[in-house]
Image (tube, helix red, strand yellow):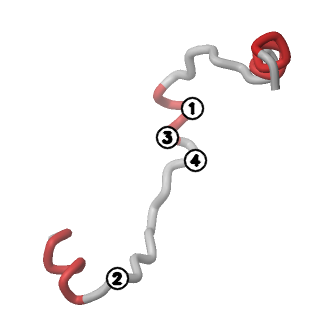
Amino acid sequence: MSLIEGLIEAQKYDFSDTSFSLLMQKRIRKVLLICSNYDDYMLE
């Protein structure tokens, strides 16, 4: 992919600011964490 093609491709995305309240409407409430006992200990 050339530089110009990459720039055209990047224009498809929206990089505008998003308010915190809009982000929090879709917040994650629960996370299932699958890990070893060692990882569990390190994450506590």
Q: Vertically, is 6 above or below 21?
A: above
Residue denoted by label 4: 26
* Element type at mark 4: loop
Residue denoted by label 3: 24
Q: Which residue shows up at 23% across the image and 78% down it? A: 39
Gap in Å between the C-alphas at discs 3 and 1?
5 Å
Front residue of 19/15: it is 15
Residue denoted by label 2: 35
Q: Mark 1 and 2 residues: CB-CB less than 8 Å, in contact?
A: no
Quadrant where the image shows the C terminus: bottom left
* Element type at mark 1: helix
User: Residue 22, labelled with which disc?
Assistant: 1
Callout 2 amino acid: Cys
Gap in Å between the C-alphas at discs 2 and 4?
25 Å
Front residue of 21/34: it is 34
Indicate the position of residue 27 as horizontal and vertical percent values. 50, 49
Crowd rating for badge 1 (residues with CA inside 10 Å; few <14, some 14–19, many 20+)? few
Q: Vertically, is 38 above or below 28?
A: below
Q: Mark 3 and 1 residues: CB-CB less than 8 Å, in contact?
A: yes
